[in-house]
Image (cartoon, helix red, strand yellow):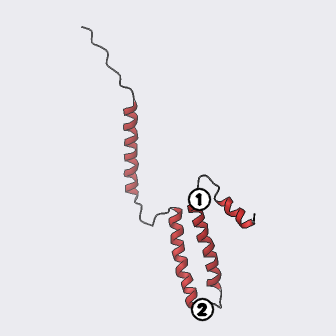
């Protein structure tokens, strides 16, 4: 097995990561490395270097999506607090519903 193949398998063996997303992320990084070489080559025409810059920005966006990061301003703290409150309420209700019902003692007549 070559060194490149062994490092690729080491990257995707973690049970906590999603192998497909992880592999796609590393592919994007490899593409960026090759684009960097092209963009910094002084012999390349300006149009090719500009295309690399545009592609770089697209790859950065894809990497953000693969990492699961939201866009800035997409998450609002107020909404998150409401979600947490609703989650707590549902947990309390389910815990209350799971408790056994105690029958009151029979009245002596």
Quarter occupied by residue 5: bottom right
Residue farthest toward the left in the current orientation of the protein: 109
Residue 19: which disc?
1
Q: 30 left or right of 104?
A: right
Q: Secondary structure at mark 2?
A: loop
Seen from the viewer's position, the closer of residues 13 and 47 is 13
Please give the name of the residue rendered at 54% of the width and 72% of the height, measured from the top-left corner.
60
Seen from the viewer's position, the closer of residues 74 and 24 is 24
Residue farthest toward the front in the current orientation of the protein: 1
Instruction: Tell me if label 2 and label 1 are in contact, CB under 8 Å.
Output: no
- Residue 72, x across and y down, in percent: 45, 67
Q: Secondary structure at mark 1?
A: helix
Q: Residues within 10 Å of mark 2 (few under 14, many from 20)?
A: few
The quadrant the N terminus occupies is: bottom right
Of discs 2 and 1, which sits in the foreground?
1
Asked if residue 88 is positioned above or below residue 70 in the image, the reply reads above
Q: 10 left or right of 98?
A: right
- Residue 41, x across and y down, in percent: 65, 86
């Amino acid at each position: 097995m070559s060194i490149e193949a062994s490092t690729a398998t080491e990257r995707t063996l973690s049970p906590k990561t999603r192998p497909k997303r992880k592999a796609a992320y590393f592919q994007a990084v490899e593409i960026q490395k090759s684009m960097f070489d092209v963009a910094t080559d002084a012999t390349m025409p300006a149009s090719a270097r500009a295309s690399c810059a545009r592609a770089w920005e697209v790859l950065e966006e894809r990497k953000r999506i693969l990492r699961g990061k939201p866009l800035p301003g997409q998450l609002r703290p107020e909404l998150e607090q409401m979600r947490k409150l609703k989650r707590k309420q549902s947990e309390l209700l389910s815990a209350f519903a799971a408790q056994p019902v105690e029958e009151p003692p029979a009245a002596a007549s």
